Image (cartoon, rainbow, N blue to C red):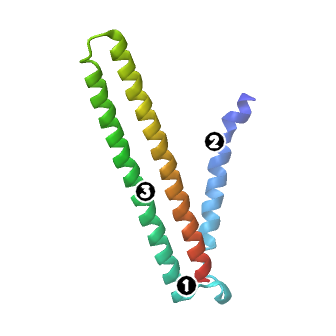
Amino acid sequence: MRKFFAALPMIGLILGAVAIATEIRTNDPLPAGQQLSGAVVSCIKDAVDKKETALISAAVTYQNGYIAALTAKKTAMLAALDKTTKKEIKLTLVAASKTYKTTNNTLKKTLRYLQKTAKSAYKTEVKACK
């Protein structure tokens, strides 16, 4: 079994070299029936631009929310240490962690939703381009 796994990198290198050689030889232009017109290419470029802009916006929204959640957690934890009893400190720390976790989960769900929406809109726009 060890010999099999030891040979895998070599097989990968050989297959990769074959794939690259094939790519170099088949770099011919597409037949006339498979080429895209300028209007279609322009439409697809617009769709790609909109999708990528939406994905960047979603990532920035997530990042800003995540930083705000971490800052709020830090502030709450530091405030918890100003309490006088162990019980108050523990309750405040647990509440801060719970709030952070809930906020972070909501941010992740929002990010996934925005990504899914952007990709869905992209697919719809590309289909309309053809």
Mark before the other along the chain sequence, 2 or 3: 2
Q: Nearer the viewer, residue 99 or 8?
A: 99
Closer to the observer: label 1 or label 3?
A: 3
- Establish if 130 lies above or below 97: below
Disc 3 residue type (three-letter): Ala
- Percent of width and height locating residue 66: 37, 42
Instruction: Name the image quarter holding residue 28.
Output: bottom right
Q: Residue at x 45, y 46 (%)?
A: 107
Quadrant housing the C terminus: bottom right
Q: Nearer the viewer, mark 1 or mark 2?
A: 1
Residue 128: percent from left, percent from top: 60, 81
Q: In this view, which residue lies farthest toward the right?
A: 1
Secondary structure type for disc 3? helix
Q: Which residue is mark 1?
A: 40
Q: Are marks 1 and 3 in contact (CB under 8 Å)?
A: no
- Is residue 50 left or right of 116 when viewed as pictured? left
Q: CA distance from mark 1 to mark 3?
A: 27 Å
What residue is disc 2 on? Answer: 9
Q: Name the residue tied to disc 3.
A: 58
The answer for how far apart the CA atoms under marks 2 and 3 are is 38 Å
In terms of depth relative to the viewer, which is nearer, 114 or 18? 114
Sequence-earlier tag: 1 or 3 = 1
